[in-house]
């Protein structure tokens, strides 16, 4: 039986039939829908990647401080730690974490970012894709294609579940970003469309049920550090898929389940700032001497 | 919905609904007014009121009124820019009833005209304008939009569509709203293409037409 249009299985079948990567299927679909030539779309994607790159650089170069005082330059702190040789699992891993923190901090401080798929989850894709591409020496042309794969996976999630923390909790935002990044990494590193499917399934399954509990309703805590988690999760899941591990559930089924779980998450855990970490009393600012969140 | 809605929009943080969507609501209202407002009373509803300050929502709404794009890094300085340009503004909390939690009502005034607009930011930077000068509307700023105010009477829609049709303009949606039979009416027309000045002029010269406003398509940064 044919796969319904808009599912990952549908696009995967087309990719396998044509013998092309998923990014080609998504790019051609976008060209058809928008009436723009693929080269124009690729140039547009490169523009967006450059905005992301600037955001990565900004938070690492200058400590970002938010008006609430909850964000206090942790990305720059992480960068110094790496430069000092403190990396736990090697610089590639630590720099991926620092990049995710950086973009998410720039977002929290009203800097320029690309929502991907949302502003709250904007650190995951640039961190995972840029850092792995640097590590593996992938050229920009390959990266552009990987971003189309990521975007196409996002469209599937939007169709079958949700990309909004208010609708589906943080699994729908950082979780979706992580699944998009995992799939895109698999293609970037030469994996098959089937392996992309497995990586998406792994990544989303790993964060199933993750609530959205922004402290003071702001996209700061725990959001920024969850971006780091999403990027690390993406890399781990891409690696598992590339190693030949297979998900027992297809990605579409995991995505649909994420949507169902999201709808059943109580409202206080869906971006309302009325539950979870969002209602804990704030502590821990005495030592820093900065910020004003205790006032 | 396309790939660039997923990998995008390019915007200043921290929230596509609280920040990028708020800029677009401000931009829609400014374009509907037709010029930079001299004064603005901005009523924040629901989540816009509750968590808007920390998300920079008031700054974003002001930035839109000042014609800054959603990715303009001047948005955090919108208050200062407004003061420089002489835009008088005031924020208040309002209860707009059973509407989307991210909603706002704006009263704008310029030298020649006044305007009341209510709109919601519905996610991902997308917006829904639901009230203009007391008329219930349903607009999202994605299409070039013409708004016509006139006394309700037979034939008004036909006259408008004739002009648009003669100019080769395809209508995406057309809705006529009226206060009461024979009362004041508002027609909203979303078009596939931007109408020329000549077309807008012809609409303005229709008999009994009180006001014709035009809102260009709201582009997105990047």
Image (cartoon, grey):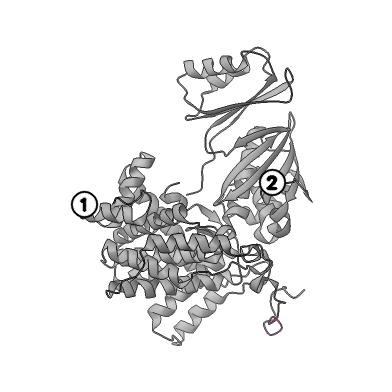
Mark identifier at residue A18: 1
What's the residue at 57%, 39% (across, down)? B140
Name above or below for residue B42 compared with residue B189: below
Residue B118: give x, y in percent of width and height: 69, 41
A84 and B32: which is toward the camera: B32
Q: Are marks 1 and 2 on the same chain?
A: no
Circles 1 and 2: CB distance less than 8 Å? no
State how far apart marks 1 and 2 are (Cα).
47 Å
Q: Disc 2 on helix, strand or loop?
A: loop
Which image quarter holds the C terminus of chain A?
bottom right
Q: Specify whether residue A120 is in view.
A: no
Magenta-tinted stretch: A282-287
What's the residue at 71%, 83% (across, down)? A286
What's the residue at 69%, 18% (across, down)? B152
Is residue B135 left or right of A219 when viewed as pictured?
right
Residue B1: give x, y in percent of width and height: 45, 46
Q: Specify whether residue A93 is in view.
A: yes
Q: Main secondary structure of the magenta part?
A: loop
Q: Is residue A285 on the magenta stretch?
A: yes
């Amino acid at each position: 039986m044919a796969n319904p249009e808009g599912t990952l299985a549908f696009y995967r079948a087309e990719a396998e039939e044509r013998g092309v990567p998923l990014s080609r299927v998504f790019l051609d679909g976008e060209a058809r829908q928008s009436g723009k030539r693929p080269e124009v779309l690729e140039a547009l994607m490169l523009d967006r990647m450059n905005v992301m790159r600037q955001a990565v650089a900004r938070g690492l170069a200058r400590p970002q401080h938010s008006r609430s005082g909850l964000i206090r330059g942790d990305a720059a702190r992480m960068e110094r730690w790496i430069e000092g040789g403190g990396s736990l699992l090697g610089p590639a891993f630590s720099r991926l974490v620092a990049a995710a923190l950086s973009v998410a901090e720039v977002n929290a401080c009203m800097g320029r970012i690309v929502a991907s798929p949302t502003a709250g989850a904007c650190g995951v894709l640039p961190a995972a894709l840029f850092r792995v591409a640097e590590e593996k020496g992938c050229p920009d042309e390959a990266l552009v294609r990987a971003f189309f794969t990521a975007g196409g996976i996002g469209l599937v999630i939007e169709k079958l579940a949700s990309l909004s923390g208010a609708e589906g909790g943080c699994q729908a935002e950082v979780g979706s970003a992580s699944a998009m990044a995992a799939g895109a990494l698999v293609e970037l590193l030469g994996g098959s469309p089937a392996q992309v499917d497995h990586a998406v399934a792994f990544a989303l399954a790993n964060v199933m049920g993750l609530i959205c509990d922004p402290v003071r309703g702001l996209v700061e805590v725990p959001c920024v550090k969850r971006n780091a988690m999403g990027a690390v999760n993406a890399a781990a899941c891409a690696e598992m898929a590339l190693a030949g591990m297979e998900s027992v559930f297809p990605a579409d089924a995991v995505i649909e389940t994420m949507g169902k779980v999201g709808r059943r998450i109580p409202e206080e855990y869906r971006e309302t700032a009325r539950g979870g970490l969002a209602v804990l009393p704030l502590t821990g600012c005495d030592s820093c001497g900065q910020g004003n969140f205790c006032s | 919905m396309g790939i660039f809605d997923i990998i995008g929009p390019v915007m200043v943080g921290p929230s596509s609904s609280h920040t990028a969507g708020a800029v677009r609501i401000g931009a829609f209202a400014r374009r509907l007014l037709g010029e930079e407002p001299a004064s603005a009373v901005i009523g924040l509803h629901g989540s816009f009121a509750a968590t808007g300050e920390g998300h920079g929502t008031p700054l974003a709404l002001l930035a839109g009124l000042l014609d800054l794009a959603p990715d303009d890094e001047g948005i955090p300085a919108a208050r200062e820019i407004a003061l420089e340009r002489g835009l008088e503004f005031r924020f208040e909390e309002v209860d707009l009833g059973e509407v989307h939690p991210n909603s706002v009502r704006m009263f704008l005034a310029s030298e020649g005209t006044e305007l009341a607009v209510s709109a919601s930011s519905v996610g991902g930077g997308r917006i829904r304008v639901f009230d203009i000068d007391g008329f219930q509307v349903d607009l999202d700023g994605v299409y070039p939009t013409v708004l016509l105010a006139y006394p309700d009477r037979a034939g008004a829609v036909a006259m408008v569509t004739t002009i648009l049709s003669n100019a080769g303009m395809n209508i995406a949606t057309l809705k006529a709203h009226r206060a009461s039979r024979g009362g004041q009416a508002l027609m909203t027309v979303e078009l596939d293409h931007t109408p020329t000045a000549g077309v807008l002029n012809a609409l303005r010269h229709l008999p009994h037409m009180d006001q014709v406003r035009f809102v260009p398509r709201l582009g997105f940064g990047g």
